Amino acid sequence: MRGLRRALALALLVPSALAKLDISGARAVVTGNNGAEKAYAIENGKWSEPVALSPAATLKLTFTVTDGGSGVAPQQAFIVFRDTQDDEAAPVTLQLGAKPTGKTTYYMDTSKIPSQLAHTSGALEASLVLSHNGEGYKTTLGALSLPESSLLEKPAAPTIGNGIAFAPQPEITHTFRPDEKEIPVIKASLGAFAVMAPWMTLLALVGAVWPSFTVKTPPTMMYAWFACLVALEALILRYWIGLRLYQLLPPFIVLGAITAYVGTVALRAARVERLKAGGTP
């Protein structure tokens, strides 16, 4: 669209009669479904008479773009179709491809016309818009009619029942989930007692046998073993937070071996202390 606007602006600024950009050898040929051909001469940028296409017909438009008499490939080339029976419809713009020599060919088969044209009234006005090196060219070729069999019905415009675009809508209602039922105090107390009863029983038993316990200071190696176990757990926690397995294995193996050795020494020391106190092996 930007290229089309530029070409249109250039075409308006530079009159076709004075501009170097022009077309030559323009010719339109319509081939019917029975193979018969009808040629339309194009003089001064307009074909000799309105072009009427029948079902399954083909339109072939050929011309050569020239600049100062020499054929050139324009930087922008469009064929524009305007619906003459619908002033509000936007023009249908189709891009054309030109050879380096400037020769340009456009085909239209009424059995498979572009979808943009299928939604028009069929009564069209064709125009050419060209642009090259700052120069523009625009010409209205003339009237072009499409067969009704190639057209599609236009979508109906949306209608509003009472003519009000923003009519009040029905109120939106929402049903909230009913509040949860509160547990009676008696049931809640029984549940709390059922949960705490085992712990209360355990504390009562520990309190009953605690006076018979004799607490002795463990061997020093027991503290070292406990420190190794804590370090091992800390390493596992660090792995869970952010280490990868290959980063964990080397220190884990080393620390595991140290923990096993310290544990063996600590258990032996504890056995010696127990035997000195008169315990059984």
Image: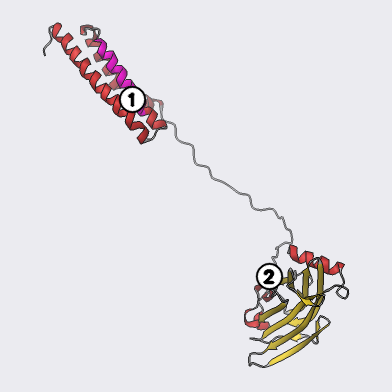
What amino acid is labelled 1 in the image?
Glu
Residue at (78%, 87%) from the top-left corner? 41
Residue at (41%, 31%) from the top-left corner? 241
- Which residue was labeled with disc 1? 233
Sequence-first disc among 1 and 2: 2
Image quarter of residue 262: top left
Is 153 or 11 nearer to us in this picture? 11
Give x and y (percent) for residue 115.
65, 73
What amino acid is labelled 2 in the image?
Ala
Is 63 or 129 nearer to us in this picture? 63
Mark 2 surroundings within 10 Å by alpha-carbon count, few (fewer than 14), some (14 through 19), many (20 or more): few
Mark 1 surroundings within 10 Å by alpha-carbon count, few (fewer than 14), some (14 through 19), many (20 or more): few
Image quarter of residue 32: bottom right
Is 174 or 275 nearer to us in this picture? 275
Q: Specify start and end residues of the magenta stretch as a single range.
A: 218-236
Is 30 or 210 nearer to us in this picture? 30
Give x and y (percent) for residue 141.
79, 80
Determine the secondary structure under disc 2: loop
Indicate left or right for 263 with 178 as reference. left
Indicate left or right for 151 with 5 as reference. left
* Numbered badge on residue 156: 2
Disc 1 from disc 2: Cα separation:
74 Å
Asked if the magenta segment contains residue 219, the reply would be: yes
Residue 212 appears in the picture as rendered: yes
Residue at (87%, 67%) from the top-left corner? 13
